[in-house]
Amino acid sequence: MTTSSGLPASTLPPHFAYQNQRLMAENVPLDRLAHEHGTPLFVYSRAAILDALGAYQRGLAGRKHLICYAMKANSSLAILQTLVREGCGLDIVSGGELERALAAGVEPSKVIFSGVGKTRAEMRQALTAGIGCFNVESRAELDVLDEVARDMGMRAPVSVRVNPNVDAQTHPYISTGLKGNKFGIAHEEVASTYRHAATCRGLRVVGIDCHIGSQITQTGPYLDAMDRVLDLVQAIEAEGVAIEHIDFGGGLGIDYQGDAPPEADSLWAQLLQRMDARGFGDRMIFIEPGRSLVGNAGVCLTEVLYLKPGEHKNFLIVDAAMNDLPRPAMYQAFHRIVPLTPREGEPTTWDVVGPVCESGDWIGRDRALVAQPGDLLAVMSAGAYCMSMASNYNTRGRAAEVLVDGENAILIRARETAADQLRSERALPAV
Ligand SMILES: *Cc1c(COP(=O)(O)O)cnc(C)c1O
């Protein structure tokens, strides 16, 4: 099947489609939003977020579970509220994220705190807020948390993040479950770490945690990790330390470029089968999905500024850049790029690049497009790890964001101005 634009329909994520030669997010034409709010502009589909969440909810239906959205994927307040209002908890990795999480109205007991480098101040902040669990990543961190909690006359709820030593078969920068990674406690040291934690008066062991990587497109690594985690739960409980919940992390991939990750519900059908077979079917399950909830629910709209054909390469210079869309520069990541209003004609092969003064500032390479200055393009699959990684490099203000719901579109973040950026700076005294 092809759309009126001649593009195969299957190349566009759900809730994004051409209607009368205009790319729509749900029932809103994207060119209208670009004219109203300017570019670069992030646009998210609420229905796409809820559909992605629905697959996890179906997969875990009838089981004791908590879906903690890994908010580093996209921490914009309205996105958090969208998920929190559906009952999600949040997986945080900093004190700043905790403040955002609370501002979004999450129940503190549904917040879990991950990351290898929590500071004492962040630990105190999270204990004061009453979060549900600290996912601890080293013996040293465990001892500091114990001390901080005892000083406050509290007991910190903890899980140990285990490194199951399985290869998630993804990009090395987003693979986290191998021995050579900085994440988690090695399989061999897990049981002794739990023995130790159980003796700490400032700690209360509540669970076990594992997260093997990101943009995972195969079921195998998950099944292997589940087996290894269940082995550990058995070993830990044999020593008399109870594990109330199993946190299986996030990491499920999305389709950027014809990738075919398993659906969350079918993945969980298989994982639950493993858990049932080994007698862990009634255990409380936590998960921490990030990218798979929001990645394909967002696009970044950008305007073509200049055509710069050359002897070796043709450059299409657009007004979005690596400060808005850091994934290509960071991971050589691929995002589909499509016109908001397709033009007739013979496509040219372009490198789509931004205005930032770095050769790494590219958004797509060797893309066949028919484009003229002033045309609008959509960079697809930009809902995760784009806005939350955006920077002010080149003193570029961060983009505006809009959330679409059916026919309605609301601005959820105003475009950042230069004045916003200067506000926290202090000029030298006059000479
Ligand atoms: C980043 C992260 C996640 C989310 O990963 P996704 O690939 O976005 O699903 C979950 N848990 C931890 C500990 C993380 O660091």
Image (cartoon, grey):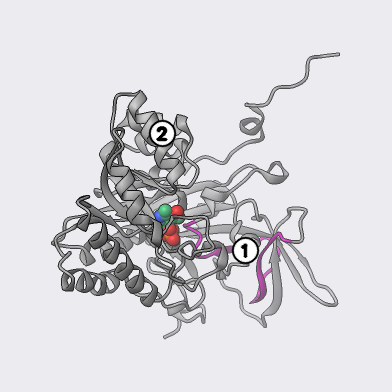
Q: Residue furthest bottom?
A: 1
Q: Is mark 1 within 8 Å of ligand 1?
A: no
Residue bearing the label numbered 1: 328
- In the rendered structure, the answer to whether residue 344 lies left or right of residue 263 reads right
The numbered dot on residue 395 is none
- Give the magenta range: 360-384
- Identify the amino acid type marked 1: Pro
Q: Is mark 2 within 8 Å of ligand 1?
A: no
Q: Is residue 369 above or below residue 94?
A: below
Residue at 41% in and 47% down? 114
Residue at 20% in and 74% down? 273
Task: Report how far apart the C-alphas of labels 1 and 2 lie in the structure.
Answer: 34 Å
Residue bearing the label numbered 2: 123
In this view of the protein, can residue 284 be seen by the observer?
no
Residue 35 is covered by the magenta coloring? no
In which quadrant will I find the C terminus?
top right
Q: Quadrant of ligand 1?
A: bottom left
Of residues 221 and 156, the one drawn nearer to the viewer in this rendering? 156
Of residues 145 and 1, the one drawn nearer to the viewer in this rendering? 145
- In the rendered structure, the answer to whether residue 260 lies left or right of residue 352 reads left
In this view of the protein, can residue 11 be seen by the observer?
yes
**Neighbourhood count class around disc 2 (C-alpha, 10 Å): few under 14, some 14–19, many 20 upward:** many
Q: Earlier in the sequence, mark 1 or mark 2?
A: 2
- Identify the amino acid type marked 2: Met
Q: Secondary structure at mark 1?
A: helix
Residue at 55% in and 70% down? 336
Q: Is residue 332 above or below residue 70?
A: below
Q: Is residue 112 above or below residue 45?
A: above
Residue 314 % position (x, y): 77, 73
